[in-house]
Amino acid sequence: MDLRRLTRVVKVDPKSRLATLEAGLRGPEIEQSLHPHGLTLGHYPQSHQEATFGGYVATRSAGQASTGYGRVDDLIVGARVVTPRGELVLGGRAPASAAGPRLLDVVVGSEGTLGVITEATVRVAPLPTVKRHGAWFFPSFAVAATALRTLVQSVGHGGMPDVCRLSDEDETRVNLTLAGAMGQRLLRYTDLRGTSTPALLVLVWEGTDRSEVRHRRTAAGRVLSRCGGRRLPAQVSRAWERTRFSGPYLRDELMDRRVLADTLETATTWDNLPRLHTAVRAAISGALEVEGRRAVVMCHVSHVYAAGASLYYTFLTAAAEDPLAQWRSVKTAASDTIIRAGGTITHHHAVGTDHRAHLAAEIGPLGVGILRALKEQLDPAGILNPGKLIPDLPPGPPGEETAPTAQHARAGA
């Protein structure tokens, strides 16, 4: 199904700071439609240039500035969905409601399995007129993670930088090496001060009030300094911002050259973050470093919450004779470890087929049953995106056959 012609801006309400947009609008088109009204969605995933508004909603997307602006599930207030059983119009009547469970949450993250999202209403923000950048070095990823936790729990979510991106030691070294002369200068800077494996924190603040942005930046600087950070030139953050959308294109180039390159992500609470970071990194390395192959495994925090943070891994190695089987071994090892170590199977890349087998371990059999009941109610013939999101039915008691419904058979479940 092609939604590329659903590109209408249905309504922009500057007074309520709401916008109703059709699902086919791409990231740049969304911003182009809002900027004349002095507004922005502030949603910039790495796929910003290609991803669509409907895709944001269907995958429960998070952008690079979501620490400041919020994820899609924080921004959405209403949606229109076409299902095989009829049109479903949810929310949008009021800023809040106690009219039963929030059915809008059934749509967000539904991945096209329950209906086709044709339009949605979201909160928008004033278009920023002030932007400030910052960058910090920390002795280690663990020290830097503690600093981020201290920052968000000290200043509150509203006082945080809009972008918080913390690279672990391996990602920091690779990125600085790729940064050319500036990166080499920064590497020498850390070596001179006895920090051979630093962790780099990149921050961006945005707003419409110069003094408010300055206050947030100053407050963050005080906390980060107390926690062992060393301030770097703001140029480091600006350099990251200039190439923030290049990752997917670089991955395609590497794969054309027989380099296996991909990403995966998770999230957990602060108390579990060091354990999860180490465990998943070890699982990826163990699956890749076979038959004498060397691998590069990097990680960064891309989203910060009062209770925890995300972990986003990038891995590269020489492609094997069967790169798809090689990738599956990595994905399985990492996903099994994420579940065992107490992380979520996906923080912002959605479930699809890659994570479907592991979703049941996160939501339990009763949760799987609820998803299947929704599917039966809205899509009884099972024609919408079969095989995605919803896990297979668990086996019945020994000796008992479980007869598949027509929907399950069509979905290949």
Image (cartoon, helix red, strand yellow):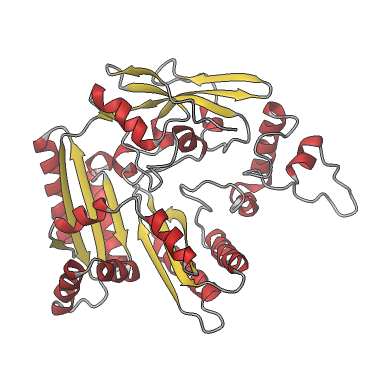
Q: Position of residue 132 (x, y in %)?
A: 15, 46
Q: Position of residue 49 (x, y in %)?
A: 38, 42
Closer to us: 86 or 374 = 86
Q: Is residue 164 visible?
A: yes
Q: Is residue 47 above or below residue 279?
A: above
Q: Is residue 102 visible?
A: no
**Residue projecting furthest to the bottom:** 292
Closer to us: 412 or 157 = 412
Q: Position of residue 186 (x, y in %)?
A: 17, 70
Q: Is residue 236 left or right of residue 351?
A: left
Closer to us: 102 or 210 = 210
Q: Is residue 95 above or below residue 361?
A: above
Q: Is residue 379 left or right of residue 271?
A: right
Query: Which residue corresponds to the image point at 46% horizontal and 68% vertical from the top-left?
Result: 257
Question: Residue 188's quadrant in the figure?
Answer: bottom left
Closer to us: 309 or 351 = 351
Q: Position of residue 11 (x, y in %)?
A: 37, 17
